[in-house]
Image (tube, helix red, strand yellow):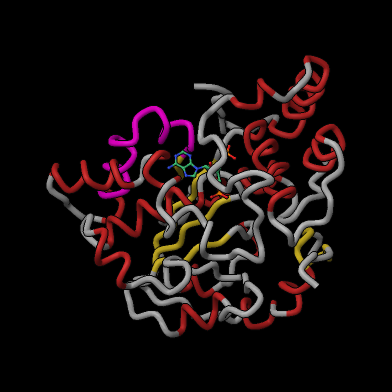
Amino acid sequence: EIVQELGSLHGVPLYKSFIEGWPRVKAFQARPDDVLISTYPKSGTTWLSEIMDMIYHDGDVEKCRRDAIYNRVPFLELKAPGEMSGIEQLESTPSPRLVKTHLPVQLLPTSFWEKDCKIIYMARNPKDVAISYYYFHRMAKIHQDPGTKAEFLENFMAGKVPYGSWYDHVRGWWEKKQEKQLLYLFYEDMKKDPRQEVQKILQFLGKELAEGIVDRILHHTSFQEMKKNPAANYETMLPILMDHSVSPFLRKGVSGDWKNHFTVAQNERFDQHYQKLMAGSDLHFQMEV
Ligand code: A3P
């Protein structure tokens, strides 16, 4: 059965198959030179992973391809049917490893904190995340039918979606920034000025790359290039899991697409709810760029 029911892990809605494998995820042994890419789903995980992979390979596309398993940056907690689990892939990956996760901060295996790993978090404004997540529910076959857009929006606001509340996720990781090696990035900034954001990443990693290599990375990780890159667009990687004819994985890749989907009333309701849940936080999102 491809459709995954949701269970609850410490109050966070997650796929049941993932909850079954949780003990191994929880016990995962991070290495000090692991770098963790952390996101709420649909916030630019694949984009940031591609950028990181290119940085790690000094902008050499061929080297990236050679190192490919089925997905070059394994998801800590996930296992696709017929594939190795993320944990298995990671255990057979030589250092320095890149690791990807959608886990809320309180569920991250403690070993990442003990080993003081570098973490890069990328957040995206909730309206675009909600719309992107809706289309992802429709095209990725592990999900139950998301219902109408209006129904999905209610569930999103209530945190009744895989990985739970967006609001808790972005706030939880934001607060960790006070005490840990954590670079907190925004999808909207990456859209506006990718060069500047890549420089931030390089500085965080303590790495220098020649201008020409940065140019190559920016070109290779642009939406247009990634959309036609079979190693990045998921079209050949997980054909039984995704139906790109329903909605492509790399769907629009812009900020502010929510305006084509939210009604005025939905937007007002969403804003009110947002203000309530984000009150007291100094975390700010650009809803359009
Ligand atoms: P849209 O559905 O709004 O187009 P994730 O990788 O976390 O699942 O996020 C997927 C979202 O990131 C999709 O958003 C996808 O199009 C967008 N995305 C992926 N690569 C991108 C790129 N190079 N530039 C801009 N957006 C990108």
For the view shown, which residue lies furthest in the top direction? Answer: 264
Please tell me whether residue 189 belongs to the stretch shown in magenta: yes
The quadrant of the rendering that contains the N terminus is bottom right
Residue at image coords 73%, 59%: 141
From the top left corner, tell me how far across and down residue 70 is, in percent: 47, 71
Residue at image coords 29%, 35%: 196
In the rendered structure, the answer to whether residue 219 lies left or right of residue 177 reads left
Q: Magenta segment, which residues?
A: 186-202
Check the image and report above or below for 233 versus 4. above
In the rendered structure, the answer to whether residue 213 lies left or right of residue 196 reads left
For the view shown, which residue lies furthest in the front direction? Answer: 245
Residue at image coords 47%, 57%: 37
Residue at image coords 72%, 25%: 261
Examine the image and state in which quarter residue 150 appears. top right
From the top left corner, tell me how far across and down residue 255 is, in percent: 53, 28
From the top left corner, tell me how far across and down residue 277 is, in percent: 75, 34
Check the image and report above or below for 12 versus 161. below
Q: Using the image as rendered, state which of residue 180 and residue 254 is in the foreground.
A: 254
In the rendered structure, the answer to whether residue 252 lies left or right of residue 31 reads right
Check the image and report above or below for 280 versus 48. above
Q: Using the image as rendered, state which of residue 27 and residue 56 is in the foreground.
A: 56
